[in-house]
Image (tube, grey):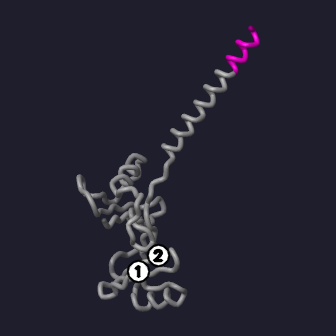
Amino acid sequence: MKSGIIIGIAISFCFGFGMNSLLSTTEEKKNNEKLKLGNFSMSLSVKDLKVSQKFYEDIGFEVFADHSKDNYVILKNGKTVIGLFQGFFSNNILTFNPGWDENAKKVKKNDDIRIIEKHLLEKNIKLDSGVEENSEGPGYFTLTDPDGNAILFDQHF
């Protein structure tokens, strides 16, 4: 009988330990779930759009969206996307497009710009500009990383 009690205690301990591990793993996964930031690209500030476009085409990029009449073009090489912008901003910008893939197609699973903004604010990350309050659909916000790099989150839908 004594051995039965010991076995029962051992089984209870193992069951409790296993359930605790399962629950903490589930909770840990929930807390560490990654945000879906969407397509990533570099937005480059260029001095001469035509000269820069030719340079990037010569190293293997192709025009994806030609807005040269508006002083910018979007170029691709495989899944790599860069934007060349003349006269828009003074420094290069890291750009994320929540809800888009590298072909500017809407993805099924994405995080709305407001969810990403809320997450960053909860992490005490200072934003330079925010999404319009109580808005829906398209929106953007900006921030600066600790090294002074500008980051744009720009949702188009």
Pick the residue in front: 94 or 36.
36
- Residue 118 percent location from the top left of the image: 36, 50
- Residue 72 percent location from the top left of the image: 36, 82
The residue indicated by pointer 2 is 81
Pick the residue in front: 132 or 128.
132
| Marks 2 and 1, the one that precedes in the sequence | 1
Is residue 1 found left or right of 75 in the rendered image?
A: right
Q: Residue at x 39, y 56 (%)?
A: 111
Residue at disc 1, secondary structure: strand
Residue at disc 2, secondary structure: strand
Pick the residue in front: 109 or 48.
109
Say above or below: 114 vs 94. above
Quarter of the image with the C terminus in it: bottom left
Q: Residue at x 40, y 58 (%)?
A: 110
**C-alpha span from label 2 to label 1:** 7 Å
**Magenta highlight range:** 1-10
Say above or below: 59 vs 147. below
- Residue 30 percent location from the top left of the image: 49, 43
Q: Residue at x 42, y 65 (%)?
A: 96
Instruction: Please rate how many residues cluster around mark 1, counting C-alpha atoms within 10 Å: few if below 14, some from 14 to 19, many from 20.
Output: many
Say above or below: 13 vs 71. above
Amino acid under disc 1: Ile
Is residue 47 on the magenta stretch?
Answer: no
Identify the disc placed on residue 74. Answer: 1
In terms of secondary structure, what is the magenta stretch mainly? helix
Q: Are marks 2 and 1 in contact (CB under 8 Å)?
A: yes
